[in-house]
Image (cartoon, rainbow, N blue to C red):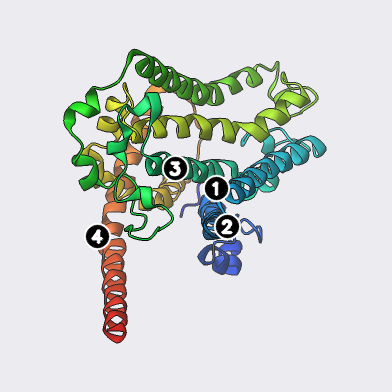
């Protein structure tokens, strides 16, 4: 991939990939500590591991009751927060994905950041958000936020538990069902209190997410870089350091969950979010994002490892490199999507269709 003076080619071409290639395929690279091979794919392992837990949560909710399901979800979320707090405090880790990997205690990425049960809070909060939305739609009332939210209930969600005579649960916010709602109800029918509450919650959601993003600026105000790498010398106290490391993902997830609920309920003031993020423009590039995620470090390593001189930061260089690398990455991603990802998706669809057809014939 390159052999320049920077010596970074080993981050791609190394013996770890020859030894632990199977860990990438099985999504366990963060467990067997094989993340030195394609290190940026650690999140794929976390995401898959959390996804495999989801059926059990749904099963508990449906079989043991909603109260039990919510209780298990709350316990798991609190346990994840407590585990973060304990590990960061006991090992004196700097709760930063960059600073936490330098100095004497350089285990933050391996011990906290890349561990699925440590960063499970956003996923669990997302599950809770879906359950809450399902309950709101099933009851057919959105309160002050959605006005006449009974018209939002789609696909027979009021028959959530499959009661006799019902059609059973259907996908949330089916486009066809949403389009059946009168347009005037999407924009009107909200009282002043409802508008104020919806706008207030929207501002709160942005405030929570902005807090998580920008408050770490205060931790970088060190007289020298080595001070920022030490819990004892950093501007933040050990308690603040541990609290931020254990709660920042939850706070971000709560802010995002609040915003998404407002959008799903079509609360006042959220039309711009639905129009912006739901625009047809995103349909084409979104198909390339997964390949871009996998390919972009390879492109960066290929170009930067050709450099035999030290890098100097310039704003103009940063912008030009961003545009150039993004163009190259998405062009390569299009090639991968066209010749690998799309054909494989078509083959899988054909196989699943054949299996479903045979199953239906046998059943008949």
Give the farthest residue toward the front: 164
Q: Which residue is mark 3?
A: 135
Secondary element type, mark 3: helix
Is residue 317 visible in the rendered structure shown here?
A: no
Q: Determine the CA span between mark 4 and mark 3.
A: 40 Å
Residue 32 position in % (x across, y down): 66, 61
Circle nearer the viewer, 3 or 1: 3
Residue 279 position in % (x across, y down): 23, 36
Quarter of the rendering occupied by the C terminus: bottom left
Reading the chain from its start, which is encountered first: label 1 or label 4?
A: 1
In front: 193, or 263? 193
Circle nearer the viewer, 2 or 1: 2
Secondary element type, mark 2: helix
Q: Residue at x 59, y 61 (%)?
A: 28
Circle nearer the viewer, 4 or 2: 2
Q: Which residue is mark 2?
A: 60
Q: Which residue is mark 4?
A: 338
Crowding near pointer 1: few (<14 within 10 Å), some, many (20+)? some
Q: Residue at x 51, y 56 (%)?
A: 51
């Amino acid at each position: 991939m390159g052999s320049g003076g920077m010596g970074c080619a080993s981050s791609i071409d190394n013996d770890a990939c020859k030894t632990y290639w199977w860990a990438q395929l099985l999504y366990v690279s963060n467990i067997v500590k094989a993340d030195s091979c394609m290190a940026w794919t650690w999140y794929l392992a976390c995401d898959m591991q959390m996804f495999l837990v989801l059926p059990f949560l749904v099963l508990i909710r449906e079989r043991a009751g909603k109260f039990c399901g919510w209780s298990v979800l709350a316990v798991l979320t609190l346990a994840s927060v407590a585990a973060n707090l304990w590990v960061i405090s006991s090992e004196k880790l700097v709760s930063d994905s960059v600073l936490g990997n330098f100095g004497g205690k350089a285990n933050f990425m391996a011990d906290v950041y890349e561990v699925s049960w440590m960063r499970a809070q956003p996923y669990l909060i997302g599950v809770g958000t879906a359950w809450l939305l399902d309950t709101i739609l099933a009851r057919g009332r959105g309160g002050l936020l959605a006005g006449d939210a009974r018209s939002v209930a789609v696909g027979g969600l009021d028959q959530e538990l499959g009661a006799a005579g019902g059609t059973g649960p259907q996908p949330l916010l089916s486009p066809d069902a949403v389009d059946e709602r009168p347009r005037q109800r999407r924009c009107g029918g909200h009282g002043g209190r409802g508008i104020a509450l919806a706008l207030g919650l929207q501002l709160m959601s942005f405030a929570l997410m902005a807090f998580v993003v920008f408050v770490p600026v205060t931790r970088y105000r060190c007289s020298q870089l080595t001070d920022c790498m030490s819990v004892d010398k950093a501007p933040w106290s050990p308690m603040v350091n541990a609290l931020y490391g254990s709660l920042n993902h939850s706070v971000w997830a709560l802010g995002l969950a609040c915003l998404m609920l407002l959008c799903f309920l079509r609360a006042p003031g959220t039309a711009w979010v639905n129009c912006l993020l739901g625009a047809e423009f995103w349909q084409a590039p979104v198909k390339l994002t997964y390949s871009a995620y996998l390919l972009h470090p390879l492109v960066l390593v290929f170009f930067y490892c050709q450099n035999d001189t030290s890098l100097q930061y310039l704003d103009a260089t940063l912008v030009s490199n961003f545009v150039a690398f993004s163009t190259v990455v998405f062009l390569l991603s299009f090639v991968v999507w066209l010749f690998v990802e799309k054909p494989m998706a078509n083959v899988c669809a054909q196989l699943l269709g054949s299996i479903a057809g045979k199953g239906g014939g046998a059943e008949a």
